[in-house]
């Protein structure tokens, strides 16, 4: 009986001795787990922060790239528009030079510009008589007049020649001189209703419709450019009406 009690006391002492040791171990485990969990949370937070930074950094770069591309595209579009505008203006200017000048108000040829005085002040009258042919395939033509001795009226122009159908140009004034020479109508008594390129003939030919101031005479005059010599009449049609 005494031995049994002694054994119980010994077991009780062992329990008391082992009890606190296990409690300490559990506390250490909890502390270790807490530390590990905290580290895991910190690592996850760091990963999220780094990923967030990388994502938005790439997004900003992509936005900047798109913006730069848009700026370059807009600049190129504006440059193309400017070039197209310049080309269109040059084309319009060329068309104005090539197209005939036809006005609702007739052009009077009373005076010539001081800058349009040609080298030959006078043109030698043709030696042979004009060749006059009655009628034509055009019912509006009364007679057709030609003369192989018609001459060019002279020019102050040099270099490659391109007809200029502009009333203030030297070319225009020289064409009027050739028309006056062929028809015999003084420029002061001439009204120009049409003067432009002869689309039925070569590039160097022009055609005009002129009348006297009193409209008693109406002519369609064909003239031709001769290099370094100027314009000369090649055919004149007397019309019933312009």
Image (cartoon, rainbow, N blue to C red):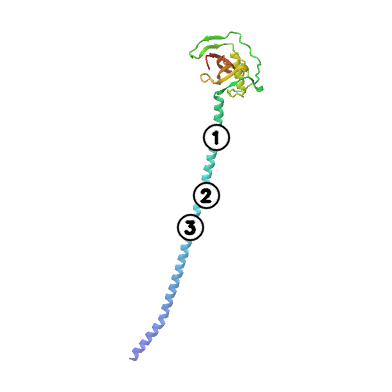
Q: Nearer the viewer, residue 170 or 26?
A: 170
Which residue is at 55% across, 35% downward? 83
Disc 1 marks which residue?
Answer: 85
| Vertical relation: 151 (above or below) 90 | above
* Alpha carbon separation for disc pair 3 and 1: 49 Å
Name the spot of residue 78 as percent of width and height, x first: 54, 39
Q: According to the image, label 2 marks what residue?
A: 64
- 16 and 65: which is toward the camera: 65
In the image, 103 versus 83, the foreground residue is 103
Which residue is painted at 45% across and 70% down in the image? 34
Q: In this view, which residue lies farthest toward the front? A: 214
Q: How far apart are labels 2 and 3 at the CA level?
A: 18 Å
Marks 2 and 1 sit apart, C-alpha to C-alpha, by 31 Å
Q: Earlier in the sequence, mark 2 or mark 3?
A: 3
Q: Position of residue 118 (x, y in %)?
A: 65, 19
Whether residue 90 appears in this view of the structure is yes
Q: Residues within 10 Å of mark 1 (few under 14, many from 20)?
A: few
Dot 2 crowding, Cα within 10 Å, few <14, some 14–19, many 20+: few
Q: Residue at x 42, y 80 (%)?
A: 20
What kind of element bears circle 3?
Answer: helix
The dot on residue 52 is 3
Q: Secondary structure at mark 1?
A: helix
């Amino acid at each position: 009986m005494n031995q049994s009690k002694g054994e119980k006391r010994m077991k009780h002492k062992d329990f008391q001795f082992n009890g606190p040791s296990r409690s300490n171990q559990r506390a250490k485990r909890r502390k270790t787990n807490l530390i590990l969990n905290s580290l895991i949370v910190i690592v996850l937070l760091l990963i999220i922060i780094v990923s967030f930074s990388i994502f938005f950094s790439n997004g900003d770069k992509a936005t900047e790239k798109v913006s730069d591309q848009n700026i370059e595209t807009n600049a190129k579009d504006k440059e193309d528009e400017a070039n197209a505008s310049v080309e269109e203006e040059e084309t319009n200017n060329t068309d104005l030079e090539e197209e005939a000048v036809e006005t609702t108000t007739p052009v009077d040829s009373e005076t010539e510009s001081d800058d349009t005085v040609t080298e030959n002040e006078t043109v030698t009258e043709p030696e042979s008589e004009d060749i006059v042919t009655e009628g034509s395939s055009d019912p509006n033509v009364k007679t057709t007049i030609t003369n192989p001795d018609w001459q060019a009226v002279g020019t102050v122009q040099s270099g490659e020649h391109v007809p200029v159908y502009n009333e203030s140009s030297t070319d225009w004034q020289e064409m009027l001189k050739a028309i006056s020479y062929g028809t015999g109508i003084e420029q002061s008594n001439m009204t120009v209703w049409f003067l432009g390129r002869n689309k039925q003939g070569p590039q160097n030919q022009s055609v005009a419709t002129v009348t006297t101031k009193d409209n008693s005479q109406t002519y369609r005059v064909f003239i031709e450019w001769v290099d370094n010599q100027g314009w000369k009449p090649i055919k004149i049609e007397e019309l019933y009406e312009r």
